Amino acid sequence: MIKAGIDAIDFYTSHYYLDLAVLAKARQIDVDKFYVGLGQRKMALPAPDEDIVTMGAHAAKQVLQRVNPEEIDSVLFATESAFDQSKSVSTYVHGLLKLPTRCRVIELKQACYAATAAIQMGIAMIVRHPHKKILVIAADVARYGLNSSGESSQGCGAIAMILSANPRILAIEPISGFYTNDVMDFWRPAYQDTAIVEGKYSTLVYLRALEETWKHYHEQTKRNLSEIDCFCYHAPVPRLVEKAHKLLLKINGQTDLSEETINQQLTDTLFYAREIGNTYTAALYIGLLSLLEHSKQDLTNKRIGLYSYGSGCMAEYFTGIVQPGYRDQLGVADHKKMLKARKALTYDEYLAFYNFRLPEDGTECHTPHNETGAFRLAGIKHHQRQYEVVAGKQTEPDVVDSDFFVIKARAPGKLILSGEYAVLFDRPAIAMAVNRYAETIVSPHFNKMISFNLLSSRYAESFTIQTLREIKHRITEKYQQFSQGKCGIKEVLQTPLELMQYAFINVFDHINSKILNGLEIKTTSTIPIHCGMGSSAASILSVQKAISKYCKIYLKNEHLLRFGVDAERLQHGKTSGLDLQTSLHGGCLFYDQGKIQKRDLPHFPMYIVNTGTPTTSTGECVEYVLREFGKSDIWNEFETTTRAIDAALQTNHFDELQTLIRKNHALLVKIGVVPEKVQHFIQAIENKGAAAKICGAGAINGDNAGIVLILSETAEPIQSICQDYGYTLEEVEGEQNGVSLI
């Protein structure tokens, strides 16, 4: 089944808020009725020139920076604050964002539940067309009467999500529990601009619906509550969420948890809700984003339970699995900045905002200018709402001008456990990421130049963007000559620095970014260079990851891989992508004909020895093996050995693994990539009962073969052999994480 879910997510709320202490003072009641009784401290309020369209469009603008807008197939807008009986608000957003004309636009309504309906509808579309992407927006203004019981439960905000196959944030699981009942707990007739609420009754319905949806979910999945790691609820007010969570625990027999433990389970998901108030359709998903952005725990592969409720009523309980690398897709810093920049309203300012009304007869009007997001409601003309882009906040490609904006990215090196060279003949291979890293720091530069500094290699130069494009053109032409057999692979790149230059400019041109000042790109590495541990792949990925983040563009893993292959082939000629895949994803990978399967990292004692930089490059070794063994049956033996090693790893059979590593070494000797000196060294290790093999291209000339992997229960017998050969023995461990921001 196709995995589908949330690939990108962002939210927006008004620049203005009212502290409920101000409201409590005006209403002459104890502030704890709000702070404690509701669990609420502030409520966001829209300015007169802001509405669901401007908020939804701003949130969508932010999230679209992380994908190609041309890939958007549909816009699904969920709201219960719509202002037109015919035209959907999604058409306004579509126009403001200049999305493709070949795009569906739909508005959905079922009270606060509608966003979940949009997500489930969008996922069904993706399952049918996996290459498509769906933009889901939920935006609302929660508005209640002055001096009413619901006045303190107002708020406003918008959430925008990109749905796709193979999502980067949350994979939605296919089974849901749902419940519908025709009740009148909350409704807003078309002739009113405030809702009618039966507060206590609505609470009872909300809780009953939770119980019914959980029962339905449990009946279908047979999962227990203990199999859900984190919880998100639709949040009209935080106190209701706390009641709901206690009920869910009680239903499942978990009645012995302390009040403190229960509150801790909800603190992260309710952080934004306490700051902005009720956002109706957006509330559940702002809670999800709040959890992802505030949890100190790594939520990778954790199951999140989500309870969606809409008055009237419709409810659904479903779950999703957090995806590896999800933190790289979040805009935590932007959201902190947005909330910190808000203005607190006085009571009189609150009344002025609340009492502002657009004409209901179509009379032309112009709204007063206030602080808004990227868009504002300018007024009404000829019965039509007029929207405009706010000056200085246009939706052109982002211009980076941040004197203090420093981005760091890190990518791990790798060791090939089996299948080097065989992978070039569509045979399987096994590789694991290890705790050696390439790190790249991107920061502003005082001039217009792009400064590169390879600290490990002592290369440093500065270039203009135009010069880098010329270098890219020259390298591309040289690679074409190599492909035609007119030159060797060593002639494609003139210096190691050119690999980083190409990796940078190739991504930079693709994301179509602009910079007002120059950049300084510093790359350092603890991965031995040209020794078979994937230093090139890790360096390329760290540069790509850092520069895309600096330019506020979120590249999916498949894009990082594609750009990485473009660059790595310049160094190696033909590349399988194995080094890049391992550094990209981390962990242990079984790689077969371009497809990868995750394996548990081995926990056996492992060591490495650097026998020295080979005199022949990886590209030259590949050329030799392709020429001499391209039609050999030896690759069948490599495949058999690799699959046996995979089985030994999965069963934790160390002795069997050592035997198979020795066999793998013997095959590498047969194809001529293990120098004689290194053969003698490995033979000495085998005589001590251990096993060893080269872990890269090796060499076809000279004494050096780069890295040798050693499997030995203890280091002592190996140390003396290393001393005899003048080598240094190092411990090495697997690295679970792939390329990431640090």
Image (spheres, rainbow, N blue to C red):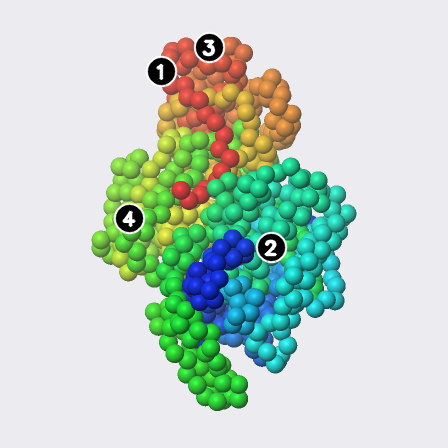
> Which quarter of the rendered picture does the C terminus lie within?
top left
Residue 31: tell me if it is visible.
yes
Which sits earlier in the primary sequence, circle 3 or circle 4?
A: 4
Measured Cα–Cα span from mark 3 to mark 1: 15 Å
Cβ atoms at labels 4 and 2 below 8 Å apart: no
Please give the residue where the numbered disc 4 appears in the rendered image.
520
Front: mark 2 or 1: 2
Which sits earlier in the primary sequence, circle 3 or circle 2?
A: 2
- Extreme-front residue of the structure: 28
* Residue drawn at (33%, 56%) of the image: 469
Does 721 sit left or right of 211 as displayed? left
Please give the residue where the numbered disc 3 appears in the rendered image.
717
Which sits earlier in the primary sequence, circle 2 or circle 1?
A: 2
Task: Please state which amino acid type lies under the numbered disc 3.
Answer: Pro
Residue 571: tell me if it is visible.
no
Please give the residue where the numbered disc 1 appears in the rendered image.
726
Circle 3: element type: helix
* Residue drawn at (54%, 55%) of the image: 37
